Image (cartoon, coloured by chain):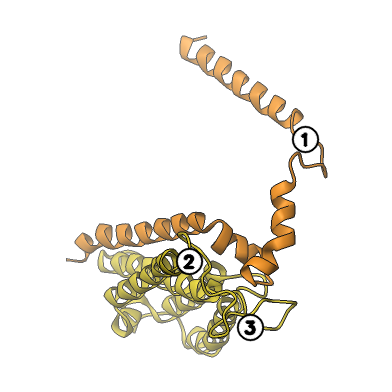
Amino acid sequence: MPARNVAAVIFFTIVAVFFVFGALMTHPFGDPGNPEMDQYIIDNTQGETGADNGVTSVVFDYRGFDTLGEATVLFTAFAGVIVLFRRLKK
Amino acid sequence: MSGMSKIVKTISSITFPFVTIYGLYVIAHGHLTPGGGFQGGAVVASGCAMILVAYGSVWTMGKIKEKHLSVLESFGAIGFIGLAFLGLIFGTMFFKNFLVGNDFLFGEIGKGLSNISTAGALPLMNFAVGLKVIAGLFGIVLVMAYTTKAKGGKIE
């Protein structure tokens, strides 16, 4: 067996062991470890943002920077496609 | 004569307004019902992509150019970031919801469903992101389809 295959087998064994232990060591189902943030958002989202939809209030208000990053990703994709395909049009 | 057959063109022309209105409904009620700017914008962009597939990219490019879509998307991005900076100016921090609590625009506190004048700056941000997603996704599909046609590809 070549050395590269041996290295690949060892590497994937280590990755698989990490995945299995990661799956076994998560918290049990239905018992989140620290629910303070979740409970805060559930309790205060209507009073603080006025929105009935809690998901929208989290996405656009509590986690606004995440949405800004998503918008930046879309803008970059559009600009990249425009720049990449403009040369082919001529 | 580009595009698909007359049946496909007729059916897509009939269903296009309903798809667009549903997507705009999802955007406008983003702070009340499931969905929001991204999801509604994806719905509207899918309707525009349906028109693009049915009528061909040359006909669609004759109706709307990608530079117009670029301007629309830039307006959406500037609106979104501008609303965030208005929170910095009128409120306390970046992305502060500065419109909530007033009696001018979207200022009421939601106490259940079916009151659209709530949630402060969130509906305006939904509009901005929806405009951005509509222009961005449809622009990407339009430019790629038109360029493939110009290079002699299979897609019309």
Mark 2 and mark 3: Cα distance apart in space: 23 Å
The quadrant where residue A58 appears: bottom right
Q: Residue flagged by tag 2: what amino acid is it? A: Gly
Q: Residue flagged by tag 1: what amino acid is it? A: His
The quadrant where residue B63 appears: bottom left
Question: Of circles 2 and 3, which is in front?
Answer: 2
Q: Residue at 72%, 31% (x, y): give it.
A: A23
Please give the residue where the numbered disc 1 appears in the rendered image. Answer: A27
Please give the residue where the numbered disc 2 appears in the rendered image. Answer: B91
Q: Is residue B106 above or below residue A45?
A: below
Mark 1 and mark 2: Cα distance apart in space: 39 Å
Mark 3 and mark 1: Cα distance apart in space: 39 Å
Question: Which mark identifies residue B116?
Answer: 3
Q: Chain of mark 1?
A: A
Chain B visual colour: yellow
Q: Chain of mark 2?
A: B
Report crowding for label 2: few under 14, some 14 to 19, many 20 or more residues within 10 A (C-alpha). some
Mark positioned earlier in the residue sequence (2 or 3): 2
Chain A visual colour: orange
Q: Is residue B150 above or below residue A38?
A: below
Q: Position of residue B131 (x, y in %)?
A: 44, 75
Whether discs 3 and 1 lie on one chain: the answer is no
Q: Is residue B156 visible?
A: no
Quarter containing the C terminus of chain B:
bottom left
Q: Is residue A87 visible?
A: yes
Report crowding for label 3: few under 14, some 14 to 19, many 20 or more residues within 10 A (C-alpha). some
